[in-house]
Image: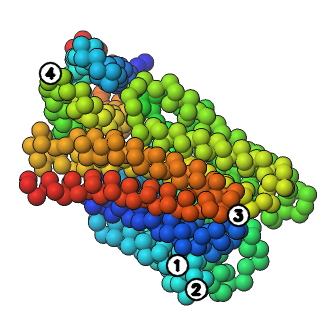
Amino acid sequence: MSLASLSLEQAPPISVPFRFFLSAPLFLLLAATALLVAGPVALESRWSTALLSTTHLLTLGCMSMVMCGAMLQMLPVLAGSPVPNPRMVAWAIHLPLLAGALLLCAGLYLGTPLLLQLAMPLLIFAFGTFLCIAAYSLVRAQARNASTRAMLLALAALAFTLVLGVLLAGGVAGLLELPNILQLVALHANWGLLGWTALLVIGVAYQVVPMFQLTPLYPRVITRWLGGILFALLLLWSLYPLLPQPAAGILSLIAACGLAACITVFALSTLRLQHKRRRRVPDVVLQFWRIGMFSLLAATLLWMAGQFSTVLSESTFYPLALGILFIVGFALSVIHGMLYKIASFLVWFHLQGKLPSKEVPNMKTIIPDTAARRHWYTHLASVLLGLAAALWPMPWVYAAGVALFLSGLLLLANLYGAWNCYRRMVPKA
Amino acid sequence: MQTITDYLSQYHQHCDNLFAEAENAATKNDLDAAKAGFGAFRDSMEHHLGMEETILFPAFEQATGSNMGPTRVMRMEHAQMRELFAQMQAALDASDTQTYAGLSETLLVLMQQHNFKEEQMLYPMADRAVPDRDALIQKMEAQ
């Protein structure tokens, strides 16, 4: 690419990321509703239909929705050139992702193979399109750094997660004979959570933690190696089902310890950097990151304990608590925090030039701190009550469901408020 | 040998420090310290933006033969930052630290994404494209 053709403005239309952002809280509301309707039965086992559905409402419907939308916003900046036809691309990813996630979760909840069969082509199309566009932009990226490398690995992990998910759905829908469904589930979950989710958060954190809180940079040794090692360990761990015992057990334990070490290094160094931040202002985004990092540490500790204690790892509590800590405590916290920064900045950014500058509201007017903080409290409550429900489903599943519902409602209100602020002000221009 | 990327990225760091001091003071409602801090930050930023606009960008544009590419967007973002500086100054003059905090938050995100594009893309390109790098850095130092 010639220097002169490098474009540094490339922001896609505001409706591109916002359609993803505004859809995400709807899935939180649905997840909460599924828990409330199913009640304690949902938490009797990790294989309950209600819990499988809730998990996918959170990971596929909420997390992946935001992650795809935020990447579509960010990729053109990294690549130095706009995604062609951004609105059409957004339609081609958002709509099938939305419909596919709804169908899949309904299919899991109701145990209806037909719904899973309908969801598959939609999800394959949505993620396939997203993967092609994201990989193309990243490969061409002008900025070659630890972040873009981690993001590429995250995309590869998403591709594995998708393939494994399609196989599993095919198995559940009765289209395929799967040899060992439990191992496939473990692979699917690990590639989705430790690969796609953690690697993307890590890649984003390298940039945004120092940027937004004015902390020192992550140590070079971390940015250089951590993402690659994590990915390699995931690959190694994926091979263990192919080996005979006891080699398989040993390999799996070594890989798990290595993965736990990587995650711990990331979480601790993030907390340490944030502790050394130069920006000493009350910041709700920082608070979301803190819930995220402490939950990640707690999840890792629990996971390691489970490696050495079969009493723990075979309990009903163990997989539930791991999921709650990683998905709600870690991933959703970081995602909520980032959403507040991105959504309010985008509204400000897109109003620039359309209104006299003095009339453009600042970020804290677009989403007030008090509103974001209220959401923070309900979100924290949903993590803690979720853990209580993992131990004592009755009556805590209801409390956790209500907290999750409120959290989704407040997130929706805050994001919709930002979007509405944009819509209200634009016609004046 | 110092590169344009190193030289100007260090300046970003310096400005970030001053930004944080002013914001921290405003958060504590220490108006005098906030005004002094903001003044120092704004002066440093103006100096930095001026170096880019009068020395780096023209050299880059000459070397690449275009003033419609990346430098145009960078100049536009400079203008947006200056607009926020003016509003922040007005908020401090009105002793309105709450509005200052909101503007400061907005400026930080604008400034950081701008610095990212410069440090990751524009400066490294300038390092490759500008024929006499050392002379250019000396010129910026002298300004």
Of residues A384 and A336, the one drawn nearer to the viewer in this rendering: A384
Q: Which chain does the numbered disc 1 sit on?
A: A
Residue type at mark 1 is: Ala
The residue where tag 4 is placed is B93
Label 1: how many residues lie within 10 Å, few (<14), some (14-19) or many (20+)?
many
- The kind of residue tagged 3 is Ala
Quarter where residue A38 is shown: bottom right
Mark 1 highlights which residue? A106
Give the chain letter at badge 3. A
Q: Residue furthest front?
A: A395
Instruction: Look at 47% across and 75% down and name the residue there.
Output: A102
**Residue A252 position in % (x across, y down):** 80, 54
Of callouts 2 and 1, which one flags the residue occurring earlier in the amino acid sequence? 1
Report the front residue among B21 and A123: B21
Circle nearer the viewer, 2 or 3: 2
Please name the residue that numbered disc 3 is placed on: A186
> Are the residues tagged 2 and 1 within 8 Å (C-beta)?
yes
Which residue is denoted by mark 2 in the rendering? Answer: A112
Residue placed most toward the observer, A292 or A160: A292
Q: Are marks 2 and 4 on the same chain?
A: no
What element does badge 2 sit on? loop
Work out whether A319 lies above or below B33: below
Q: Which residue type does callout 2 highlight?
A: Thr
Report how far apart the C-alphas of labels 2 and 3 lie in the structure.
22 Å
Give the numbered dot on residue A179: none
Q: CA distance from mark 2 to mark 4?
A: 65 Å
* Horizontal relation, residue B87 to residue A23: left or right: left
Amino acid type shown at disc 4: Asp
Label 3: how many Cα within 10 Å (few below 14, some 14–19, many 20+): few
Crowd band around label 2 with a 10 angstrom C-alpha radius: few (<14), some (14–19), many (20+): some
At 24% from the left and 13% from the top, the residue drawn is B32
Q: Residues within 10 Å of mark 4 (few under 14, many from 20)?
A: few
